Image: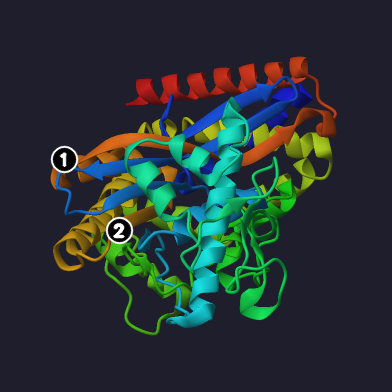
Amino acid sequence: MNRTTITARRLLALAALLAPAAAAQTDSPYLRVVEPDEHTIRLDVAVRTLVPTDAAHPIVQLVGAVHIADAPFYADIQSFLDVHDLVLYEGVGGGRESVPEPDGGDQAAALTTARRAMFLAMLGEARAREGDGYPTTTGELIEGFDGAMRDIVAGASRDGWGRQLVVENGDFDVLSLGADGQVGGGGADADIRGRALLDNPPAREQSDDAAGLQRDLADALGLTFQLDGIDYSHPHWRNSDMDFGEITEALGGTPAAEGEGDQGKRGRLDPDAPDKLKAADALFNTLSGESFMAKASSFILKMLGSNPTGRAMVKIMLADTLTQADQLLAMQPGGLAELMDVIIKDRNAAVIRDLTAVIDDEPEVRTVAIFYGAGHFGDLESGINDQLGYEYESTVWIPAITIDLRDAGLSAKQVSFYRTMMKQMIDSQMEMMKNQK
């Protein structure tokens, strides 16, 4: 077996291991790999708009997450999420503590303005990326969308003081002139520019929760880990997930007693535990960095990510594998396949339960964003549509990982060879698992 094949097999194993964090379907409406030119390969993540048949119910947007990505991806996603009335997000470890925000006055208006300006600047970039060129006004941007998405964009087109946000130059730099409506000024009167905020999001301290194999992968590839790139502290963000105890129960185990520590959160593993619980324990240990497999994978990652060519190869193969990851996982035998039912379907049921409560009890909420791993959305979208009376309307694509082949010293021919080999290996693995079943 030659060196290239050995490297590719290592990458396939790593990508499959990390797939539960961001799985998607083949030809998925939630993740795609595109080649905008001969020098670029890009993994895009979808924001899908669902509209209710009952006009009294809120608009829902499924905002796809991948747990490691380019830093600008998280700034774009943050800007999408923060203009909603409510964000329901995944977090098995529990919700993040909210930080109070200004309630009225110029401070609240400035915060609202910053969020809307970032949102519009991000959408202007999205329109240009799709080949439409930059809009020249906010009105032109609004006209580029239909239905519910157009309503959301129009609702974000005025600043916190009620004035229309304007576009200052050809790169769609969205501008508010602050509280006084005059150029320049300080404090509440300062100008607010969406592109500047989008390009320079506030720095955040790395979370202790960000340890483990996914953090190692992000560091090795020069990417950002989701918990470092996203601010979950806003009051309108709400955890909508199962906790470790609930997952343990769903897998047939016994939840830990209070105070048993991080390992206890997953429940004590009995030797006679169901296979799906053993699979869960192995997966959590690996992703947290506790297992031998995690330590070995971390070493491989550092070795492969030690040069630009290696980093680019990992990114390309990770992107290609993620777009087929749920098929790989669904075809796994025994406990792992049962585990995926809990990780996907049971947690999606928790989201639908929470969304139902919002519809029933919070009529003032007009827009809801659901921020979850893209692998959840096939089952989740079907559940929302069938159970709550929604239907799909439109998609906006957000770049998650962009690879410049020139920077990596790779030719299009080399990359085509690597990607073809990866596809053959994935097809071979799926055929083998199909035969085993």
Q: Position of residue 15 (x, y in %)?
A: 57, 39
- At a point 43% along the width and 82% down the height, the residue shown is 103
Residue 330 sits above or below residue 37 on the image: below
**Residue at image location 49% in from the left, 24% down from the top:** 429
Return the disc, 1 or 2, that comes first in the chain's sequence.
2
Per the image, label 1 sits on a secondary structure element best described as helix
Nearest the viewer among 415 and 238 is 238
Residue at horizontal 38 percent and vertical 61 percent from the top: 87
Where residue 159 sits: x, y (%)? 51, 63
Tag 1–tag 2 contact (CB < 8 Å): no
Q: Quadrant of residue 273?
A: bottom left
Write down the residue under mark 1: 386
**Residue type indicated by callout 2:** Ala
Check the image and report above or below for 310 versus 198: above
Residue that numbered label 2 is attached to: 273
The C terminus lies in which quarter of the figure? top left
Q: Residue 97 at what x, y percent from top left? A: 45, 78
The residue carrying pointer 2 sits among few (fewer than 14), some (14 to 19) or many (20 or more) residues within 10 Å by Cα, namely some
Foreground pick, 36 / 108? 108
Q: In the image, is residue 416 above or below residue 211? A: above
Q: Nearer the viewer, residue 326 or 61?
A: 61
Query: How many C-alpha atoms fall within 10 Å of the one at disc 1: few (<14), some, or many (≥20)?
Result: few
